[in-house]
Image (cartoon, helix red, strand yellow):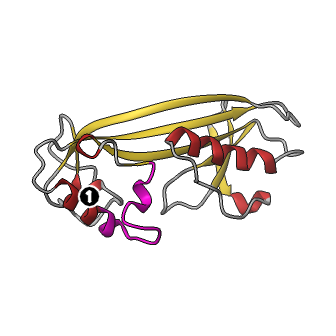
Amino acid sequence: VMFYIVVFSCPLCPLYAARFNPYGAQCHAFALAEVGLSGDIPETADTLQGNAQQKADWVWERISGMQIDGVFADDTGLEVEALGGAPGVYSARYAGEHCSFDDNIDKLLGALNGKHNRRADFRTVICLMEGSLGSRQPKVSFFEGRVDGEILTERHSNGEGFGYDPVFLPDGHDQTFE
């Protein structure tokens, strides 16, 4: 049985740990608080990779003595060509520290008003830290995923999804992420 802690950047998701058996395809997820981890996980780096590693480091530092095989943590950002890659690492707080999804979309649509280049991508960086029990120096690996698309001129919403989903149209599709 392997035990990994998975830290997602989804603002709607609680933090979870997962225990799984790769041979029996069994998985059990539970809140990090159930393994004694609590507190605010920092996201103060200026890159997606930096934030992913910062979150993984935060967990790794707090799990010494636990039988943990690894930690996954991610960070995701919307990168818009015409805005020089913004909002990027600041996607969740583009319109301010305590803004809503709608505030972020309003700011994005305002910034793109009148611009012809609406090319954008969602990019996710995952940091994986693995090590043996009590290992102080984990092996660190990074993985990246990207979806290219464009920002629409208005919301196409069905009431589901979150973040920039109502305005992001992936290449080759006729529906937004929502």
* Up/down of 79 relative to 40, above or below: above
Name the residue: 9% across, 53% down: 114
Image position, residue 15 (x, y; %): 62, 57
Residue 68 percent location from the top left of the image: 78, 41
The answer to which image quadrant residue 171 occupies is top left
In the rendered view of the protein, which quadrant contains the C terminus? bottom left
From the viewer's side, name the closer residue of 13 and 81. Answer: 81
Which residue has dot 1 on it?
108
The foreground one among 146 and 118 is 118
- The crowd level at tag 1 (other Cα within 10 Å; few <14, some 14-19, many 20+) is many
Q: In the rendered structure, which amino acid carries the disc numbered 1?
A: Leu
Picture mark count? 1
Q: Secondary structure at mark 1?
A: helix
Where does the image place residue 151, in percent across and percent down from the top left? 20, 49
Rendering quarter of residue 119: top left
Residue range corresponding to the magenta coloring: 89-104
The answer to whether 141 appears left or right of 113 in the picture is right
Q: Is residue 148 visible?
A: yes
Tell me which residue sits at (69%, 34%) in the image.
129
Q: From this viewpoint, is residue 5 visible?
A: no
Please report the residue visible at 49 percent of the width from the left and 61 percent of the height from the top: 11
Where the N terminus falls, by quadrant? top right
Q: Residue furthest front?
A: 84
- 164 sits to left or right of 6: left
Q: Residue at x 66, y 63 (%)?
A: 40
Which x, y percent locates residue 28? 66, 49
Q: Is residue 136 magenta?
A: no
User: Is 12 left or right of 4, judged from the image as shown?
Assistant: left
97 in magenta: yes
For this view, does 78 lie left or right of residue 132? left
